[in-house]
Image (cartoon, rainbow, N blue to C red):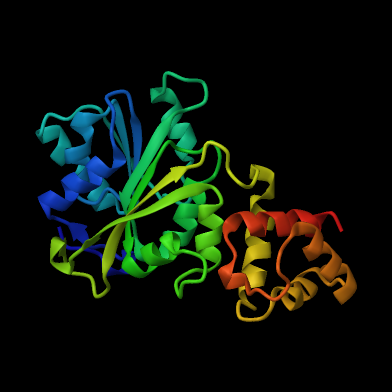
Amino acid sequence: MIPDQRLGQHFLIDRNILQRIVDALEPAPDDVVVEIGAGTGTLTAVLAPRVRWVIAIEKDRRLAHECGVRNVECGIDRLTVVHGDALRVDWHALVTPHSALHTPHFKIVGNIPYAITSPLIDKALAPPLPGRIVFLVQAEVADRLAASPGSKAYGALSVGVQAVCRVERLFTVRAGAFTPPPKVRSAVVRLTPRAQPLVAPGEIAAFRAFVTACFTRRRKQLRNVAMAVTGRSAAVVAAGLAALGVDPAVRPETLPADVFVRLLRWSAGL
């Protein structure tokens, strides 16, 4: 099967890496798993015997057919292959028929197209949240997702995801594990949604916009950033930051996610 470079296809063929990705998902016999970008079905074949059901989503019609045929030939029948765009398909609707619960309990895994990593993560973190997400992504993105406050890689993406998940950068994947080999480094990340997210579902859009606005001024002092983002006077901002117990001279790039949540709620109450 010839990869379609327009779709950013790089097939993962290293059996050891495939096994490690499935292990990272911590699959259980009753799990329903949504696989994004099933490709030729190599990851599907390792995953399916260990879970209740796999819903494999693939945009390329050729590959969707190949994935289904290959796994049938291997005797795997706990599988639904969906031909479609993962950004448009309703994942929760696909999961519900296979879940024993009214609110679906499921996990998400995938070797995802690097060009659409951020919107796929956004969709994966839309309620109802999965129990766990394991994605193979560009190493630079993995670094940003897991970055600590004050580090070079820390930014709006780090804050937005860490507000709702525990993020683990698990391991790097060499280019030779793919065909064709990608020109960028790759890594596996595991996202485990918090039992109590720092932001409520109704706050997520506003939170992301607020954090992004703050990080466009990441090297400015917080007092100046807050004035620019909220449009409030220096006196109002100084009083607000004092009430929150936040140093007005710090820079946004040094603040953890929980402080951004407090700042958002303060600004919303002005």
**Measured along the vertical axis of the image, is residue 29 above or below residue 161?**
above
> Which quarter shows the N terminus?
bottom left
Q: Name the spot of residue 269 as percent of width and height, x first.
A: 84, 54
Write the residue at 79% across / 56% down.
Answer: 266
Is residue 254 shown left or right of residue 168? right
Quadrant of the rendered image containing residue 241 = bottom right
Q: Name the spot of residue 215 as percent of width and height, x first.
A: 61, 72
The extreme top residue here reads: 100
- The answer to whether residue 66 shows anywhere in this view is no
Write the residue at 80% across / 68% down.
Answer: 230
**Measured along the vertical axis of the image, is residue 110 above or below residue 267?**
above
> Is 24 in front, or is 92?
24
Write the residue at 18% across / 48% down.
Answer: 18
- For the image shown, how many numbered marks are present on the structure? 0
> Is 58 in front, or is 35?
35
Write the residue at 40% across / 33% down.
Answer: 106
> Which quarter shows the C terminus?
bottom right
Is residue 102 shown left or right of residue 43? right
**Measured along the vertical axis of the image, is residue 168 above or below residue 65?**
below
**Measured along the vertical axis of the image, is residue 240 above or below residue 253?**
above
Q: Name the spot of residue 149 as percent of width and height, x first.
A: 51, 66
Q: Name the spot of residue 194 as percent of width and height, x first.
A: 51, 41
